[in-house]
Image (cartoon, rainbow, N blue to C red):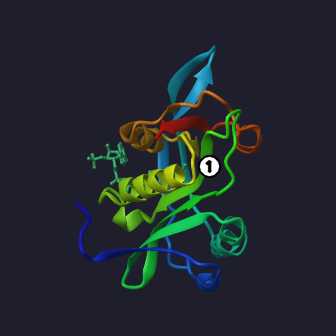
């Protein structure tokens, strides 16, 4: 159950102010990641922290979000006191051999509000919207961190039947997943 302190909104191009994500905290302390080892998916120790500097956050708004919305896609956000604390970016163009996939490009929850159901809520909103667009599945290039994969597994995601080669090339350690609508 999401607390009433959060509201949800889909952005329009007119909403895209460069500072929208300035206070968003991407920080993710990773301890174990999934890696392919002799054809088997194996959990291995790897300690690092993923984070975004201010420029990266402004680039997401100016580039990823602008392109997504210009193409008819959706950027759906959770807000707290007018501040974006979680967002999902769903591209409009369907792909795959039967145009069955909609690309869930980004899904991030600010570190101070994780584990409150926001990720699940945004994921389900994207699933609903993708179905309206005629997709049969969501496609996710998932971070290989143990907890990120656990989240997508909890959502019901499984290994993708078809690979999106752009994502595979951009993030070779990511897990390519799909979710059946
Ligand atoms: C992964 C992420 C989007 C999940 O969002 P969230 O709001 O924290 O997750 P929710 O509260 O909606 O959790 C839904 C379910 O996912 C699972 N889950 C979530 N976080 C988990 C974790 N750290 N470890 C194991 N399972 C987890 C649980 O089953 C949970 O259900 P429950 O609350 O009934 O136990 C968020 O933690 C995040 O932004 N992490 C860092 C960035 C990232 O990994 N983004 C995805 C890149 S592809």
* Above or below, comparing residue 14 to residue 106 in the picture: below
Residue nearer the viewer, 165 or 22:
165
* Above or below, comparing residue 133 to residue 10 in the picture: above
Residue 130 position in % (x across, y down): 53, 52
Residue under the image location 40 percent in, 76 percent down:
79
Residue 66 vs residue 134: left or right? right
Indicate the secondary structure of the residue bearing disc 1.
strand
Residue 150 position in % (x across, y down): 40, 39
* Above or below, comparing residue 4 to residue 177 in the picture: below
Q: Look at the image and tell me in which quarter the N terminus lies.
A: bottom left
Residue 72 vs residue 88: left or right? right
The image quarter containing residue 174 is top right
Residue nearer the viewer, 47 or 130:
130
Q: Is mark 1 within 8 Å of ligand 1?
A: no
Residue 44 position in % (x across, y down): 52, 29
Residue nearer the viewer, 81 or 26:
81
Count up the numbered dots.
Answer: 1
Residue under the image location 40 percent in, 44 percent down:
151
* Mark 1 closeness class: few <14, some 14–19, many ≥20 residues within 10 Å: many
Seen from this angle, which residue lies furthest top?
38
The residue indicated by pointer 1 is: 103
Residue 79 vs residue 173: left or right? left
Residue nearer the viewer, 16 or 94:
94
Residue under the image location 35 percent in, 65 percent down:
113
Residue under the image location 29 percent in, 60 percent down:
116
Residue 161 position in % (x across, y down): 60, 27
């Amino acid at each position: 159950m999401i607390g009433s302190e959060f509201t949800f909104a889909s952005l329009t191009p007119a909403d895209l102010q460069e500072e929208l994500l300035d206070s968003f905290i991407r920080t993710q302390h990773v301890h174990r990641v999934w890696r392919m080892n002799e054809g088997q998916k194996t959990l291995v120790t790897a300690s690092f922290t993923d984070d975004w500097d201010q420029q990266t956050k402004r680039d997401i708004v100016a580039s990823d979000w602008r392109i997504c919305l210009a193409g008819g896609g959706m950027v759906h956000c959770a807000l707290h006191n007018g501040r974006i604390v979680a967002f999902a970016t769903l591209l409009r163009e369907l792909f795959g051999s039967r145009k069955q996939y909609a690309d869930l490009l980004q899904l991030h929850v600010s570190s101070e509000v994780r584990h409150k159901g926001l990720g699940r809520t945004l994921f389900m909103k994207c699933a609903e919207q993708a179905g309206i667009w005629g997709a049969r599945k969501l496609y996710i290039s998932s971070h290989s961190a143990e907890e990120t994969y656990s989240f997508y597994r909890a959502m019901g995601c499984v290994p993708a039947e078809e690979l999106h080669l752009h994502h595979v090339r951009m993030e070779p350690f990511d897990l390519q997943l799909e979710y059946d609508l």
